[in-house]
Image (spheres, rainbow, N blue to C red):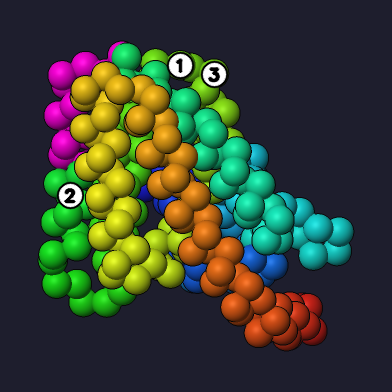
Amino acid sequence: MTTHKGNSQAAYAHIRQAIVEGRYRPGQRLVEQRIAEEFALSRTPVREALRRLEAEGLVHSEPNRGAVVRGLSIEDVADLYGLRARLEAYAAELAAERITDEEVGLLDAGIAAFEAALHTEHADAIELTRAVNAANHQIHGTILAAARHERLSRLLERTVDVPLVFQAFRQFDRAQIERSHLFHRLMRDAIVAGDGQRASALMYEHVLQGRDVLVAHIQANDTEVGELFAMATAVEDAAD
């Protein structure tokens, strides 16, 4: 029999994945009863999951509307990526001084997984994005772990916006994903060679690549998406 803790974790995992992958869109209300029915859960674990997601910054509460998927402006995106670029650049610099042989192996495995995702036939775009995103997470996570800087890790946990990273990969074309793969390999070589300055510069440029793609997409679709969110919100509010 599934425990209450297990239900809460399942609710958290389902809702978080839906937000990260864009099925629950920025500005969308997260109605406990609807979500509970969607995932065949009771409302209590859903409520607990929403509180956890709010603490992580993926959800926020609005008066008279309840839990809502947090949205970001272009300025917010630019600010987040600018901070992330500087923090991860420092992590890459430290990793060049502190990485272990075991961590080099993990880094190489992440890069190999990223390359494998590029050359594997996927049923649809979302599967490719999931595979690329998972490999990317291993690469960046290994570099951060190799930096051995606890405060830096905590700062990056609050700075790296997981849905934004996922959505950035969804907007990448083949050439941009290949470019990201090249950056990973160049960063790896600089870190292993102990060249912190080069590793830092490469990481900085790599992160800003994702920012530029995402900002361009938002600018190109801002009006249309804004109108759709407004319509969806009006329909949801009327239904309740």
Tell me, yes or no, if residue 166 can be seen here: yes
Q: Amino acid at mark 1?
A: His
> Is residue 13 toward the left or the right of residue 117 in the image?
right
Q: CA distance from mark 3 to mark 2?
A: 29 Å
The quadrant the C terminus occupies is bottom right
Mark 2 or mark 3, which is nearer the start of the sequence?
Answer: 2
View extreme (right): residue = 63
The reply to whether discs 3 and 1 touch (Cβ–Cβ < 8 Å) is yes
**Residue matched to label 3:** 151
Q: Is residue 144 visible?
A: no
Q: Which residues are magenta?
A: 98-110
- Label 2 residue SS: helix
Residue that carries the numbered disc 1 in the rendered image:
149
**Residue at numbered disc 2:** 113
- Kind of residue at badge 3: Arg
Report how far apart the C-alphas of labels 2 and 1 lie in the structure.
26 Å
Give the amino acid type for the residue marked by disc 2 in the picture. Answer: Ala
